[in-house]
Amino acid sequence: MANPYFRFKQFIIHQDRCAMKVTTDACLFGAWVAREVLARSHTIRNMLDIGTGTGLLTLMLAQKNPGLVVDAIEIDKATYEQAKENIAASPFKNKIYLEHGDILNEPYQRKYDIIISNPPFYEKELLSASSRKNVAHHNEGLLLEDLLPVIKNRLLAASRFYLLLPYKRKKEIDDLLKKNSLYFTKIVSVRQSVNHDHFRLMIEGALYNDHHAEETDIAIKDENDQYTPGFIKLLNEYYLYL
């Protein structure tokens, strides 16, 4: 059974009512995006988190970027209620606006400087017996092909979007981006350890193809099963024991 809460340095994530739990790769993704957003903070005012889940990514971005105002949306009612509690108990509650709803039917068409999502991973794969887990993990609620047009319509012209996706879908993701006239600007391939193959993609994308995408690689653990220096550098502001 997953731990009912995950304590970070500046906030706590309770997750016992959420289908999607805190994962190491999601933490890495949140820290990486928070750093990238900080580097462009002079042009960034607001962010949309699609499918916020526990509120993890929203809180990580808010911690790193004090001037950022965040809108977050979550379709699952129980998950929304727990995310609301996590955010309300954090030091960043006054700049985060959380909504319960479906982004595909959300009536307000506000545009954003940053859009972030850790969408469901596993289309067309074996489903769980739990319908909530299927929405969280298997794209029953939000297909990537439906998410990308939303991102395109909600993103300001010179802005960026960030997605965490399975590495094995890299070619499919590239094709879907091109279909929607969206483009990679940065790609980070993630491995569980230096001895493992890649299993996740952290991508930054844009509306315009203004340069060749920058591609890098990161491993979470080294050959001795210890966190790598790259992982520690990103997560030391968040993890209690780094």
Image (tube, rainbow, N blue to C red):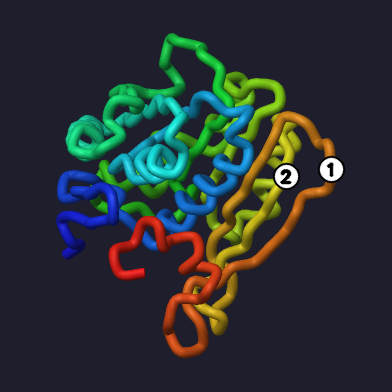
Outermost residue, right direction?
Answer: 211
Query: Looking at the picture, does residue 103 appear above or below residue 51?
Result: above
Distance, label 1 to label 2, CA atoms, is: 7 Å
State yes or no: discs 1 and 2 in contact (Cβ < 8 Å): yes
Is 223 in front, or is 77? 223
Q: Amino acid at mark 2?
A: Thr
Is 240 in front, or is 212? 240
Query: Looking at the picture, does residue 90 appear above or below residue 216?
Result: above
Determine if residue 150 is in view. Answer: no
Residue, disc 2 = 185
Q: Which residue is rendered at x = 23% and y = 57% of the image?
A: 6
Residue 111 in percent (x, y) is at 56, 17
Query: Looking at the picture, does residue 102 appear above or below residue 227?
Result: above
Mark identifier at residue 211: 1
Determine if residue 189 is in view. Answer: yes
Q: Amino acid at mark 1?
A: His
Q: Which residue is rendered at x = 62% and y = 62% of the image?
A: 189
- Sooner in the amino-acid sequence: mark 1 or mark 2: 2
Q: Quadrant of the C terminus?
A: bottom left
Residue 116 in percent (x, y) is at 50, 37
Dot 1 alpha-carbon crowd within 10 angstroms: few under 14, some 14 to 19, many 20 or more:
few
State which quadrant residue 1 falls in: bottom left
Q: Secondary structure at mark 1?
A: loop
Residue 41 in percent (x, y) is at 58, 34
